Structure formats: C-alpha cells, structure tokens
Image: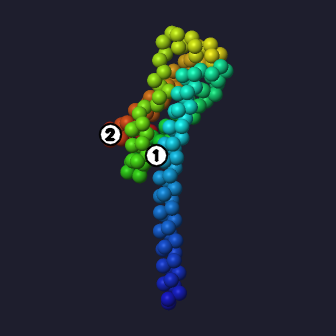
Amino acid sequence: MWKVFYITLLALIFTKSSVVLEEERGKASVSELADKIQVLDDTLYTTITSLPAGCGAQFLADVRSFNELLRQMVEMVHADKSGTKAALDTIITRGHPRFLDTPFNNEEKKRILDNFNWTLDDLDLLYADRITAYTYWTDLLLLKNDDFQREP
C-alpha cells in the first residue's frame, strides 16, 4: 500500500514539475522572441540608414523575417495575455520599429534604388512589407490596451 502511495506521490511531483517546466519554457520563448525582434529591428535600422551596396535582397528577406517574428508575437500575446505581459511591455516600452522611421522622400528613394540595385518593383515590395510591420505593431499596441478586435 505504501509503495502505491509513494509511486503516486512521485508521479504527481514529476507531473507538476513537467507542467512548471513547460510554462517556464513558454515564457522563455516569448522573451526570446522579444529579444529577436529587438535585435532584428536594430539590424534593419542600421541597414536602411547606411544602405550598404548590394544588400537589398538580404534586407527584404530580413524585413520579412521581422514581420514573421511580429506575427508570432501577436499570436502568442493573443493566446496568453497574462503570461506574455512582461515581454509585450518590453517591446512596447522600447517603441515602434526604428527601421520604419526612415524617410522616403525622393532623394532617399533614389539612394535606396541605387545602393540596393533595386527596381521600382523592389521598392513596392518594401512598401508592402512596411505596411505589414505597421499592422502587426498596431496589433501589439491594441493587445496591450485590450482593444484587439480581430483574430491574428
């Protein structure tokens, strides 16, 4: 009888530990995602402000990766607002994505086209990706303020 009791007790302790570890792993992944968003935003900002020659394709790929990270964050926060609050607060406190601050006047457009060896179609892709980034960023703001009304 005592053997059954101890085995049951050990099973309960192990199960509780597994649940706690899974919860911690989930929180860590949200925190890691927030860190990746910050690092990639810094990279994008450096690239768009310095416009290194020939880096246009990589820049567009990085913008798309950034948008995917933002999308994942929106989904995670939407699924578990209380468990992701700290990571969301960190992202929101830092401010909106810096690479979106880049002015797109005619002079800057010309520099982007020349340095990245882009066509106007490439620039249109960047515009579309910027709109996507703004949309996900707005979603995060709305989630923080409990105003989110749509499915992510």
The image quadrant of residue 109 is top right
Residue 72: percent from left, percent from top: 50, 41
Decide: is 146 above or below 99.
below
Mark 1: which secondary structure? Answer: helix
> Which label sits on residue 145?
2
Left or right side of 37 for 93: left
Identified at 52% across, 75% down, the residue is 11
**Image: 121 above or below 146:** above
**Left of 85 or right of it: where is 27?**
right
Q: Count neighbours of disc 2 (C-alpha within 10 A) and say few if under 14, some if 14 to 19, many if 20 or more.
A: few
- Residue at 55% across, 18% down: 124
Q: Where residue 148 sits in the image (x, y, percent)?
A: 36, 38
Instruction: Give the residue displayed 39% in from the left and 43% down from the top.
Output: 89
- From where the camera sits, is residue 118 visible? no
Is 54 placed above or below 84 here?
A: above
- Mark 1 highlights which residue? 76
Give the residue type that dot 1 points to. Met
Dot 2 lies on which element? loop
Residue furthest to the right in view is 54
Pinpoint residue 41: horizontal percent, then vertical percent.
52, 33
Q: Is residue 97 visible?
A: yes
- Between disc 2 and disc 1, whose residue precedes? 1
- Give the mark count: 2
